[in-house]
Amino acid sequence: SSRRILIKGGTVVNAHHQEVADVYIDDGIIADVKPNIKVGDEVAVIDATGKFVMPGGIDPHTHLEMEFMGTDSTETIDDFFSGQAAALAGGTTMHIDFVMPVNGSLSLGFKAYVEKAKKSCMDYGFHMTITKWDDTVAREMEIMVKEKGINSFKFFLAYKGIVMINDELLLEGLKKCKSLGALAMVHAENGDAVFEGQKRMIELGITGPEGHALSRPPLLEAEATARAIRLAGFINTPLYIVHVMSIDAMEEIAKARKLGQRVVGEPVVSGLVLNDSGLWDPDFNIAAKFVMSPPIRAPGHGRALQAAVSMGVLQLVGTDHCTFNSTQKAFGIDDFRKIPNGVNGIEERMHLVWDTMVASGKISVTDYVRITSTECARIFNIYPKKGAILPGSDADIIILNPNSSFQISSNSHHSRSDTNVYEGWIGKGKVEITIVGGRIVWENNELKVNLGSGKYIKMPPFNYLFDGIEKADVSYISSLRAPVNRFKAMQ
Ligand code: URP
Ligand code: ZN
Ligand code: ZN
Ligand code: ZN
């Protein structure tokens, strides 16, 4: 049974090029992209005149149905169905979630996530989180890469006593990633210093959400970012810094890239468009919404991070969607250390990046596609199946009307959470239609999603990392390629 759709007359945008053209979809795949495609009466036609036809967003950083920070806070409130439904309503058609090991076991963790993801209504991939280190973990990493389709591993330099690892273990992890052709990712904050900062706040009697930001300032993010970059440079393997939240951390990435090191920086939408003033709100429920790690920073950081994105210093935008409802956040009413960390964003990212960066004239529409979709597909080695509107690519497509507007509220969002950190935001540009796997799932503000229709996307390793960049495949991802090639000198 073939499902055919023709999208007519829109401006088709890829990261490399935009033009007015038609897009013909046949059975979940993009069959043709060119002006004036003629089709028969049986084909459904969408008129996209005056609108942008773009690859659906790919969110590189989400935490659906995750147990985190102990039993206090239970699980994140969005599962693979509600989180993905929300994503689709906001123009994101794929995400990469972080598998948490179960009792330290990667394979048990993987199994558990395969089970959780059976509810999926869009395609997804997995990163694996490493929370401890021993021979079993090292062996299991190999299985994950060679058999399970995982090509990235995240290490925590924060959350002391929960998931934090020390430098010795990080070095082991980096070596292992290099040998497997996998990408190492880090949560970069100095967990020992954060622990000290938290103690200091409690001693001073600062127990409210503002203590969260005060206990873990930008310099602790910069220290861990610089340390991870140097250790990755020492091992000579690429590094991906998740949720870059401060100017201080961004400058470490800029410096390393300028010197030729392969470092990717991922800001998240909360860090680009919010500031820390909410953490000082006298209403605990409002202030607690803003608690995430690294913290949302003082005014000025967001603007600088946006500038870094526009100049290519930072390469792609994620969300770190990690949503708790207000009763879960209230576990920390007497002590900010117990507030579960995380904010929403999977539904809001595409609109907020459009509004604050494209509608405001900071970046082009092609750059928008690059930072919200294409770059993620390239980095995780699934381009051009994902992240492009090209013949043969998956038909994951959004149609955005630049003259329409969007409005964010917990009353109308599709997340299961009862709060939204972007509450009340009104902005320009609206995703009017979302097509995923060749089906229209979002139209006229209505969702029509199919439980269980999403597929697991395996992400292949980068075997050429063994040999170094000179012998690399020509398709070697742009953001890992350094502006100045010092690779040889480092051997
Ligand atoms: O506060 C955050 N970021 N929660 C999600 C887990 C993580 O550190 O990415
Ligand atoms: Zn073209
Ligand atoms: Zn993190
Ligand atoms: Zn995260």
Image (spheres, rainbow, N blue to C red):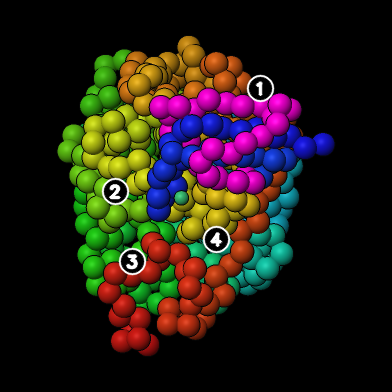
Depth check: 80 or 73 in front? 80
Q: First in sequence: mark 1 or mark 2?
A: 2
CA separation in Å, label 3 and label 1:
44 Å
Q: Is residue 397 left or right of residue 255?
A: right
Residue, disc 3? 229
Q: Is residue 394 visible to the viewer in this orientation of the structure?
A: no
Q: Which mark is residue 448?
A: 1
The quarter of the image holding the C terminus is bottom left
Answer above or below: position of 115 versus 77.
below
Residue, disc 2? 309
Magenta segment boundaries in residue numbering:
30-59
Element class at badge 3: helix
Q: Is residue 274 left or right of residue 299?
A: right
Q: Which mark is residue 381?
A: 4
Q: CB under 8 Å between callouts 3 and 1?
A: no
Q: Is residue 39 magenta?
A: yes
Q: First in sequence: mark 4 or mark 3?
A: 3
Residue 91 is situated, as x and y percent measured from the top left of the image, at 50, 32
CA separation in Å, label 4 and label 1:
30 Å
